[in-house]
């Protein structure tokens, strides 16, 4: 009886693999064919550099890249006054794309974008690692680029980018070039300035909402980037990485524009707030925290001339009143507290009662404000969970005032 193999042969079907054609290697698309750049031989490896120059006339959205104001307030906020006096050309704008978003010794930066001001404009260099074995050459090339720099400008770089790069230098047995740098992390400053107005303070959202810039269809979400790099290592196809290079370049460019805008806003807020008085109130809070009381007072006063979100308005009203109190300027503070009571701010009742009891010895007026406070606390509109404590404090005040008034009559 013929076997299955015999039957297949009789039908002309070839058995075995010896006559099969050899598999053809897949087409690769090396990075140098995808995006223009140059190879840099340094150390024991090669790194690929992608460079781009932006002239001083370049506008990112509605903002130029070169910082046009001395960043005095940014320097004070960052805790290092040297930043204000440094040549802007010693700043480096830094952003990394990494093999993971969690950090740790297993995470490395396969692409580092770094930008610097030049006499002609803004010079952007992207250092790309074609293979993880080339990491030493990338780190050495980056260190050479950083040599004239003194200040890092980043977005979350204090928590992520710089610690990660510090780790990579340490793992090579080298001292990190970042150790002696001053650092301006615009993530934290952006949260201070725009938390009231913007629900999201990511760099991408600030780019749209603050800089009024938009990216092309080449943009890619950051969470997709590590997988694209691993795909490239596996199949040698660099085409999808073109979107990663674009994403990284725009992040660095946005950092420069955001620094320029933020510095201008902080140094000259009355001219630079563009009608966004919530931003002006945020600047006032920041300069108040830095001890610039006169500037904060002037900004708070400007904010109260316009409509603001209720929470921002009440906070501004309170802060301005307490600045006047701190300066013993009660004639300026009292009308603000009275306005605050009309907006159901319970602290203002207390301040008015204290003022009339202790500063003018007008016990009847202090008693009146205490009664008004207790009436408000007893009303259904007072829903603060601390109302019990407020009620206890005002009842104690009421009893003390009544004793004082009785003693005065005897």
Image (cartoon, rainbow, N blue to C red):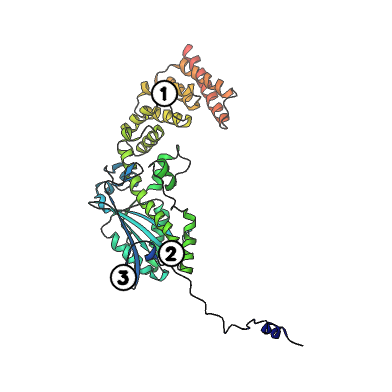
Secondary element under disc 2, as helix, strand or loop, is loop
- Tag in front: 1 or 2: 2
Q: Is residue 21 left or right of residue 142?
A: right
The residue positioned farthest toward the right in the image shown: 1
Nearer the camera: disc 1 or disc 3: 3
Reading the image, the residue beneath label 1 is 336
Q: Position of residue 45 (x, y in %)?
A: 35, 72
Q: Position of residue 324 (x, y in %)?
A: 36, 27
Total labels drawn: 3
Q: Residue at x 46, y 53 (%)?
A: 220
Dot 1 lies on which element? helix
What is the crowding at mark 3: few (fewer than 14 residues within 10 Å), some, or many (at least 20)?
few
Residue extending furthest toward the top: 409
Q: Residue furthest bottom?
A: 1
Horizontal and vertical percent for residue 279?
A: 39, 36
Q: Nearer the viewer, residue 272 or 39?
A: 39
Residue 397 can be seen in this image:
yes
Q: Nearer the viewer, residue 188 or 369?
A: 188
Toward which corner of the image does residue 51 lie, by quadrant? bottom left
Q: Which mark is residue 41?
A: 3
Element marked by disc 3: strand
Q: CA distance from mark 2 to mark 3?
A: 20 Å
Q: Which residue is at the far front?
A: 11
Q: Which residue is mark 2?
A: 238
Question: Image check: 383 left or right of 342?
Answer: right
Image quadrant containing the N terminus: bottom right
Asked if the residue at tag 3 contacts the one at tag 1, i.e. Cβ–Cβ closer than 8 Å, the answer is no
On residue 22, the disc is: none
Give the vertical position of 6 relative to 111 (above or below): below
First reached walking from the N terminus: tag 1 or tag 2: 2
Mark toward the viewer: 2 or 3:
2
């Amino acid at each position: 009886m013929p076997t299955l193999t015999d039957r297949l042969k009789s039908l002309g079907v070839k058995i075995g693999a010896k006559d099969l054609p050899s598999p053809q290697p897949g087409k690769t698309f090396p990075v140098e064919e995808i995006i223009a750049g140059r190879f840099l031989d340094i150390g024991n490896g090669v790194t690929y550099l992608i460079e781009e120059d932006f002239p001083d006339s370049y506008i990112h959205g509605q903002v130029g890249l070169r910082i046009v104001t001395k960043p005095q307030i940014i320097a004070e906020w960052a805790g290092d006054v040297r930043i204000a006096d440094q040549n802007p050309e010693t700043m480096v704008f830094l952003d990394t794309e990494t093999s993971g978003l969690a950090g740790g010794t297993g995470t490395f930066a396969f692409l580092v974008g770094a930008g610097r001001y030049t006499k002609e404009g803004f010079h952007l260099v992207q250092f790309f690692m074609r293979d993880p074995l080339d990491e030493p050459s990338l780190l050495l090339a980056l260190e050479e680029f950083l040599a004239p720099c003194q200040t890092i400008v980043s977005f979350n770089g204090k928590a992520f980018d710089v610690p990660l790069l510090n780790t990579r230098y340490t793992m090579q047995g080298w001292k990190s070039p970042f150790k002696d740098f001053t650092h301006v992390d615009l993530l934290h400053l952006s949260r201070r300035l725009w938390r009231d107005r913007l629900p999201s303070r990511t760099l991408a959202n600030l780019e749209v909402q603050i800089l009024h810039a938009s990216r092309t269809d080449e943009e890619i979400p950051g969470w997709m980037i590590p997988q694209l790099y691993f795909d490239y290592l596996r199949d040698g196809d660099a085409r999808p990485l073109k979107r990663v290079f674009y994403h990284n370049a725009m992040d660095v460019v946005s950092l420069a524009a955001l620094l320029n805008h933020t510095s201008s806003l902080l140094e000259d807020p009355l001219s630079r707030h563009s009608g966004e008085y919530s931003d002006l109130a945020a600047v006032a809070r920041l300069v108040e925290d830095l001890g610039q009381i006169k500037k904060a007072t002037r900004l708070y006063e400007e904010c109260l001339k316009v409509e603001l979100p209720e929470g921002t308005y009440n906070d501004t009203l309170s802060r301005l009143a307490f600045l006047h109190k701190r300066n013993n300027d009660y004639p300026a503070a009292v009308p603000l507290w009275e306005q605050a009571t009309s907006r159901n701010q319970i602290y203002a009742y207390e301040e008015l009662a204290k003022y009339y009891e202790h500063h003018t010895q007008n016990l009847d007026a202090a008693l009146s404000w205490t009664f008004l406070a207790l009436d408000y606390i007893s009303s259904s509109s007072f829903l603060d969970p601390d109302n019990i404590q407020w009620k206890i404090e005002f009842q104690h005040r009421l009893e003390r005032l009544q004793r004082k008034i009785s003693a005065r009559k005897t």
